[in-house]
């Protein structure tokens, strides 16, 4: 089993494209986990409905960042995107399977890859 983690922050179009590329090009025994740090719930719900096998985990900063995004839309006040959830990422990778792929939501796969073969090579 390989865990594929996608770090995400308020870019649902990119997140959708990233997940779609994984489903298209990645084969083998894997699961997808989104480590989200501020994508509004309405978009996360669309992702959940479209990709029911994807697990979405929310950072501790999530409520604060959602509030900041809403305030930005109302008043134009900048969103502090520099509170990086490093501990959240680390803690999730630490309790993952032995083999992981960590990527960003603005990255996508463009060629076939078999994670079982990668795991065997890594062993």
Image (tube, rainbow, N blue to C red):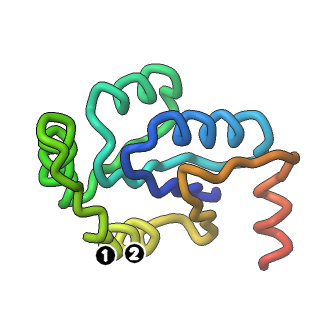
Q: Residue at the front extreme?
A: 76
Is 39 on the left or on the right of 109, as rendered?
left
Few, some or many C-alpha atoms within 10 Å of disc 2 (few <14, some 14-19, many ≥20)?
few
Identity of the residue drawn at 39% across and 75% down: 90
Identity of the residue drawn at 39% across and 66% down: 92
Helix, strand or loop at label 1? It is: helix
Which residue bears the numbered disc 1?
Answer: 87
Is 71 on the left or on the right of 78, as rendered?
left
Which of these two is toward me, 3 or 105?
Answer: 105
Which of these two is toward me, 8 or 69?
Answer: 69
Q: To which quarter of the image does residue 21 belong?
A: top right
Measure how far apart labels 1 and 2 are at the Cα level.
5 Å
Helix, strand or loop at label 2? It is: helix
Which residue bears the numbered disc 2?
Answer: 90
Is 113 on the left or on the right of 21, as rendered?
right
Q: Are marks 1 and 2 in contact (CB under 8 Å)?
A: yes
Labelled disc at residue 20: none
Q: In the rendering, at what x and y percent does residue 81 appear?
A: 30, 62
**Quadrant the C terminus occupies:** bottom right
């Amino acid at each position: 089993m390989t865990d594929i983690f996608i770090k995400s922050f308020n870019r649902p179009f990119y997140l959708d494209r990233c997940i779609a590329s994984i489903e298209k090009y990645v084969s083998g025994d894997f699961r997808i986990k989104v480590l989200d740090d501020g994508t509004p719930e309405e978009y996360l719900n669309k992702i959940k409905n479209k990709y029911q096998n994807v697990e979405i985990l929310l950072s501790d900063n999530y409520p604060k960042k959602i509030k900041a995004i809403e305030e930005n839309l109302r008043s134009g006040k900048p969103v502090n995107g520099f509170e990086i959830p490093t501990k959240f990422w680390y803690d999730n990778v630490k309790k993952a399977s032995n083999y992981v792929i960590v990527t960003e939501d603005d990255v996508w796969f463009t060629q076939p890859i078999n994670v079982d073969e990668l795991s065997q090579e890594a062993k």
